[in-house]
Image (cartoon, rainbow, N blue to C red):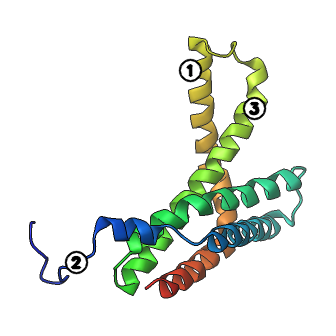
Amino acid sequence: MDGPSPDRPRTNRSSRDRLRAARPPYPDLIAGALFWGTQMLASAMLGLYLRNGLQTSRLAEVAVLYFAGGLFAWPFALPVARFFAYDRPPEARFAAFFVTLTAATIAMTAFLFAMEYRLFYSRWHAPFGSVVWAFQFVFTSISAVYQFLVIGLRLFLPLGLVCLVVSSYYLAKRMR
C-alpha cells in the first residue's frame, strides 16, 4: 500500500523522529528499570506466597532472578515500545507497551534462568568450544527455558499482570 490508509492520515514525520522518540530520558530508563524489577520481585514473592507460603530453599535465588529479569528487561523493552507507540492512538500505545514489556520480561528472566541452569550443569559438560560442548550448551539452554516457561511463568501471576496493565496504561498516557 503506497498511500495513506483511509483510517490513518498521512503524517510528515520521518523515521528519524520515530527513532528520536524511542530514546527514553535516562531518569526514566534507570528509575523505571529499578521500579519494574521491584514489581517483578514483588510479583514472584506473592506468587510463591500464594502457592506455598514462601516455603522454598531457594527463596533468595528466586528473588534475585525475578528482580534481575525485570531490571534488565526494562532498558530493552522501553525503547522498543516507544518506537512502536510513536504517533499512534492511545490503544495502540498501550498495546505496544503491554506486548514489549511482557515479551522482554519473560525473555530476560528465562535467559537469566537458563544461564544459571547452564552454569550448574557445566561441570558435567565437555570442554569449552568443542562440538559436544556446543550441543550441550544449546540443549541445556533450551530445556532450561522450557522449564522456566512451565514452572516459573506462574510466578508472574496474579500481581505481575496487574503491574503490567497499570504500567502499560501509565506509559501509554504519558507518551503522546
Quadrant in the picture for the C terminus: bottom left
Give the residue number, with chain letter if any, for mark 3: 119
Which image quadrant for residue 124? top right
What secondary structure is found at the residue carrying circle 1? helix
Image marks 1 and 2: residues in contact by CB distance under 8 Å = no
Residue 83 position in % (x across, y down)? 41, 67
Quadrant in the picture for the N terminus: bottom left
Which residue is farthest left?
A: 2
Going from the N terminus, do you reach mark 3 or mark 2 first?
2
Q: Which sits in the foreground, 143 or 32? A: 32
Q: Amino acid at mark 1?
A: Phe
How far apart are the alpha carbons under marks 1 and 3? 15 Å
Q: Please tell me whether residue 147 is drawn above or below residue 1 in the rendered image.
A: above
Q: Amino acid at mark 3?
A: Leu
| Whether residue 36 is visible | yes
Give the residue number, with chain letter if any, for mark 1: 135
Image marks 1 and 3: residues in contact by CB distance under 8 Å = no
Q: Please tell me whether residue 113 is drawn above or below residue 23 in the rendered image.
A: above
Q: Please tell me whether residue 45 is drawn above or below residue 172 in the rendered image.
A: above
Which image quadrant for residue 106? bottom right
Labels 1, 2: front one:
2
Q: Is residue 20 left or right of residue 101?
A: left
How far apart are the alpha carbons under marks 3 and 2? 51 Å
Q: Is residue 163 left or right of residue 173?
A: right
Give the residue number, with chain letter if any, for mark 2: 12
Local packing at callout 1 (Cα closer than 10 Å; few below 14, some 14-19, many 20+) is: few
Residue 29 position in % (x across, y down)? 63, 68
Going from the N terminus, do you reach mark 1 or mark 3 first?
3
